Structure formats: C-alpha cells, structure tokens
Amino acid sequence: MNFATKEYFARFKSSCFFPFAQIIFEIPDQPNPRYHFPLLLSPFSYSTYRGT
C-alpha cells in the first residue's frame, strides 16, 4: 500500500521528509479477515501498526 505523502503535505503548503510511505504486508488465507492499518503521519516521520 502506497501513500503519497508529498502530495498530501503540498495541499497544506508544507514540505515533508518522506515523499511517500509504503506499507508492505501479507494477508494469510483466513475466513473473514479484517485488517485496519493506521498511518500516523507528520512532516518528518511516519509510523504504522496493525490495528484492532
């Protein structure tokens, strides 16, 4: 999953350190899988985790 962070911050007339954030994940074969991937973003960092 790719997030265009440079374009996002440009809308607010702000610069950023990472022009994009990429989350690589694997979804195991399970019945009714549900996943939530929060992206915590600031101009100089990003973080993600598997949500609940």
Image (spheres, rainbow, N blue to C red):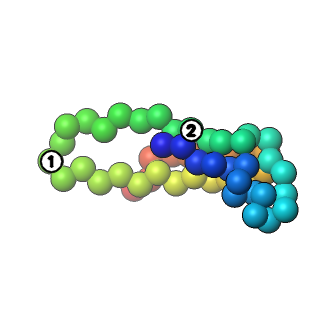
Q: Is residue 47 visible?
A: no
At horizontal 71% and vertical 54% (from top left) the residue drawn is 7
At horizontal 58% and vertical 48% (from top left) the residue drawn is 3
Q: Which mark is residue 22?
A: 2
Q: Which mark is residue 31?
A: 1
Q: Which mark is residue 8?
A: none
Q: Is residue 48 visible?
A: yes
Q: Which is nearer the eye, 30 or 22?
A: 22
Mark 2: amino acid? Gln
Q: Which is nearer the eye, 37 or 14?
A: 14
Q: Which is nearer the eye, 5 or 46?
A: 5
Mark 1 or 2, closer to the camera: 2
**Apparent side of residue 29 relative to residue 49 in the rendered image (left or right):** left
* 1 or 2: tag closer to the N-terminus: 2
Where residue 24 sits: x, y (%)? 47, 34
Q: Quadrant of the C terminus?
A: bottom left
Where residue 25 sits: x, y (%)? 42, 35
At horizontal 18% and vertical 53% (from top left) the residue drawn is 32
User: Circle 1 sits in a helix, a strand or a loop, which is it?
Assistant: loop
**Apparent side of residue 20 relative to residue 9 in the rendered image (left or right):** left
> Is label 1 in contact with label 2 (beta carbons under 8 Å)?
no
Where residue 34 sits: x, y (%)? 29, 54
Mark 1: amino acid? Pro
Q: Tell me which corner region of the image, top left, top right, bottom left or bottom right, holds residue 20.
A: top right
Q: In the figure, 23 relative to 51: above or below?
A: above
